[in-house]
Image (tube, grey):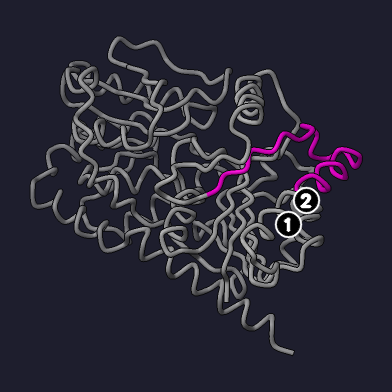
Amino acid sequence: MIRSIVVLAAIDWHFMRQRPQHLAREWARRDIDVLFVENTGTRSPALRDLPRIGNRLRMALFHDDAPGDSSDGVRVLSPVLPPYPYSPTAVKWSTQQLVRRIRSHLREKSILPEHAGLLLYIATPLALEIVHRIPWGVVAYDVLNDPKHSDMRVAKSEQTILGQADLIFFASEGLRRQYALDSQGILFRDGFPVDLIASDAPPISSFASLPKPRLLYLGGINRRIWPEAVAALCDAIPNGSVALVGPLTAADAQLPQRPNLHLFKSVTHYLQLAGFLRAADGGILPYRADTYSGRMHPAKLAEYLLFGLPIISVATEEMIRLKAAWPSGSIFLADDPADFAGAISEALSNNTPAAQQERITFAKSQSWTVRAEQFLTNLETAAALRGKP
């Protein structure tokens, strides 16, 4: 039986809430002990990483090992490790520190490693060492994107993890096919954060006062955003508003200059997003039309649909599949920036109360509570099989 799950994440706890945080919270609500290890580094640091490094140092000095949201019962570990994920010396030192902290946590909870699961969102040499140094009850690798896109040096350790993990999950069919694991890989779609719609967060006045229609993007403002797509969205509704809500995660992110483009970079709490979503007329996904972005399943889609918003997106590989799987009239696609005007017009003209309710009903049936239970069942089944002689 799995009593504890250690999540080796590729993001920090207080980043925009995504799949790792949703699963961790749901398991903690089921009285599963969860240790969420924040991003230990998947590439060499750059200047744009200085704010994140500074925040990690502050956490280490003043809130080391502090829980995340205490009501959720998740323990968050913010390790301060050398930012050189492919240096043998740094990996050796980091392994010693992290293994010590994980073992200490399990001892404190009186949990044997054999009753703990390791869930990987990174595939670095450090992650591989953590797999080997502790006799886990089950090891799973959850693939949300291709880490080799950021640094090809991860290929070797990732290949070993793919061969040794008990379970391999994929957030999209495109990723599963890319990894050629049709028989082994488990396609596991995201759930929907139903607790967000229950939030009583009021509309954000600075957003709700913008001219309508209001098109909303949630998430990191980074190099995945396609400037030409954002410009086309703004130009398609010159009397309306386009808002990008989320942290600026890349200093070199390029954005067009448009009078009706608005940035909200200082959101500090996940539930604040409800205030934006309630005042929006549509959710947008202006990502670059490349293979990397096209195979991702962006978490923000669940938030859009949960609030009944039509989704206007670049026609990526994953979005084409979701359009066929989700309720009719939920997703409107543009093959290139010139097509956004038509996609917006179609989305808004078909955004009836009945269509909104159909989207919400569908989203509620696929809650993270349901999905986390299904994920846990997979882990426990694999753990039971591993324990057989």
Question: Is 49 or 70 nearer to us in this picture?
Answer: 70
Q: Which residue is mark 1?
A: 103
User: For the residue labelled by badge 1, is the local secondary structure a helix, a strand or a loop?
Assistant: helix
Give the answer, above or below, for where 111 lies relative to 126: below
Residue shown at the point (42%, 50%) measured from the top left: 72
- Please name the amino acid that badge 1 sits on: Arg
Question: Is 246 or 7 nearer to us in this picture?
Answer: 7
Q: Is residue 321 left or right of residue 110?
A: left
Q: Is residue 141 left or right of residue 98?
A: left
Residue shown at the point (54%, 60%) measured from the top left: 33
Q: Which residue is mark 2?
A: 100
User: For the residue labelled by badge 2, is the local secondary structure a helix, a strand or a loop?
Assistant: helix
- In the image, which residues are magenta? 75-100
Question: Is 151 or 103 nearer to us in this picture?
Answer: 103
Q: Is residue 11 magenta?
A: no
Residue shown at the point (39%, 47%) measured from the top left: 71
- The single residue placed furthest to the left in the displayed view is 353
Return the x and y of residue 208 as percentages of the image width and height.
18, 23
Mark 1, other Cα within 10 Å: few <14 / some 14–19 / many ≥20: some
Where does the C terminus fall, quadrant-wise? bottom right
Mark 2, other Cα within 10 Å: few <14 / some 14–19 / many ≥20: few
Give the answer, above or below, for where 242 lies relative to 41: above
Where does the N terminus fall, quadrant-wise? bottom right
For the residues labelled 2 and 1, the Cα–Cα distance comes to 5 Å
Return the x and y of residue 29 as percentages of the image width and height.
41, 59
Q: Is residue 83 magenta?
A: yes
